[in-house]
């Protein structure tokens, strides 16, 4: 497969389709196992998820949403309380089974992670309070992970979904790692989507610099294939990682970085098993004895001091 970065990295809006700001699915060249939709809604507007045969997780990015869904002839509605921004802690999410169809309404930005499957697992509303928060790494490698869609937290067919918040100047998706070979007990084959957002840092960022906020993201090849992305990433950008080592994702000074990870693959078991790049694996050992970044965990900012969105 081509290492052409334009094939695997997409700026905000360049994958727009059928009312969605971003669509990644089986029609995307070289893509099979995962999908992503990003929608922007105003009050009174809706976005439909009319197809069965895929499992989904609806994730409010900013704002609150209602999901009306039909499953086995029964209709239900769930309110997803949402949040002011992706930097304001976890959100309610909704896992939809592979036989469900849905319509989303609300006001704000919403993500829908997808994976095609015929296996039916129970639809589930996961509240923000139920979402496991993992504080991973130490020092400049400290980051916050919301594990609402990981195997330990959610019964699903193939989808593995989480979101990561990296404070300004910190590194995540590091050391660079891969998951493109099936090695039982050591590594799993998982296609991966990164969806990015960036914003002025809570700790000293300029509220009027929202449009300038950025981070950096890299990938490079492995025996499974050649790939290369070295990009400034901003809100709405998407990176596709079919194979290869990926990372780091770096939050620039003055700007916090968020990404949503969507993973699925062809292996018989739903597991996230990775292999670090041997050249950089030693970095994990260097974390011992360092303190966790004191800025974590990120929680909602009181409304009176909330950063401009």
Image (cartoon, rainbow, N blue to C red):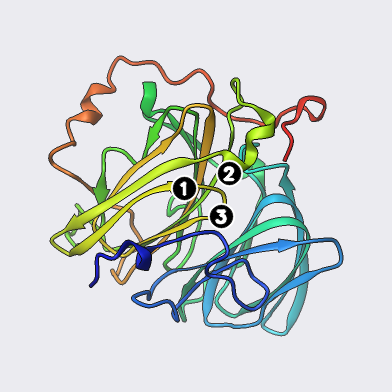
The one nearer the camera, 21 or 67, is 21
Residue drawn where x is 37% and y is 74% of the image: 31
- Residue 261 against residue 17 in the figure, above or below: above
Secondary element at tag 3 = loop
- Residue 214 visible here: yes
The residues tagged by marks 1 and 3 sit, at their Cα atoms, a distance apart of 8 Å
Q: Nearer the viewer, mark 3 or mark 2?
A: 3
**Mark seen at residue 128:** none
Looking at marks 1 and 2 on the same chain, the residue that comes earlier in the sequence is marked by 2
On-image quarter of the C terminus: top right
- Where residue 177 sits: x, y (%)? 25, 47
* 177 relative position to 91: left or right: left
Pointer 3: residues within 10 angstroms few (<14), some, or many (20+)? Answer: some
User: Which residue, given by chain and number where applicable, does mark 3 sit on?
Assistant: 236
Pointer 2: residues within 10 angstroms few (<14), some, or many (20+)? Answer: some
On-image quarter of the N terminus: bottom left
Looking at marks 3 and 2 on the same chain, the residue that comes earlier in the sequence is marked by 2
**Mark seen at residue 233:** 1
User: Which residue, given by chain and number where applicable, does mark 2 sit on?
Assistant: 131
Residue at the right extreme, as displayed: 44
- Residue 146 visible here: no
- Where residue 246 sits: x, y (%)? 29, 50
Secondary element at tag 2 = loop
The one nearer the camera, 245 or 269, is 245
- Residue 9 against residue 289 in the figure, above or below: below
């Amino acid at each position: 497969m081509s290492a052409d970065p334009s094939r695997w990295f997409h700026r905000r809006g360049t994958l727009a389709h059928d009312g969605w700001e971003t669509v990644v699915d089986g029609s995307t060249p070289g893509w099979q196992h995962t999908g992503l939709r990003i929608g922007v809604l105003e009050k009174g507007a809706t976005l439909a998820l009319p197809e069965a045969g895929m499992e989904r997780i609806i994730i409010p990015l900013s704002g609150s949403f209602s999901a009306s869904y039909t499953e086995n002839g029964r209709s239900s509605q769930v309110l997803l309380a949402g949040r002011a921004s992706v930097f304001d802690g976890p959100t309610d999410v909704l896992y939809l089974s592979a036989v469900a169809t849905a319509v989303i309404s609300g006001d704000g930005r919403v993500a829908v992670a997808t994976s095609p499957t015929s296996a039916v697992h129970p639809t589930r509303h996961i509240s923000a309070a139920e979402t496991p928060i993992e504080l991973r790494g130490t020092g400049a490698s400290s980051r916050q992970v919301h594990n609402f869609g990981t195997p330990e937290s959610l019964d699903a067919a193939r989808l593995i979904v989480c979101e990561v918040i990296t404070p300004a100047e910190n590194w995540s998706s590091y050391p660079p790692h891969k998951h493109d070979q099936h090695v039982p007990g050591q590594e799993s084959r998982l296609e991966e989507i990164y969806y990015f957002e960036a914003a002025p840092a809570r700790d000293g960022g300029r509220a009027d610099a929202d449009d300038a906020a950025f981070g950096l993201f890299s990938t490079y090849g492995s025996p499974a294939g050649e790939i290369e992305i070295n990009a400034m990433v901003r809100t709405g950008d998407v990176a596709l990682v079919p194979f290869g080592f990926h990372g780091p994702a770096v939050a620039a000074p003055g700007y916090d970085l968020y990404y949503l990870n969507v993973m699925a693959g062809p292996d018989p078991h739903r597991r996230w098993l990775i292999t670090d790049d041997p050249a950089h694996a030693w970095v994990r050992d260097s974390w011992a004895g360092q303190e966790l970044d004191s800025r974590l965990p990120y929680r909602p900012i009181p409304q009176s001091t909330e950063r401009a969105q």
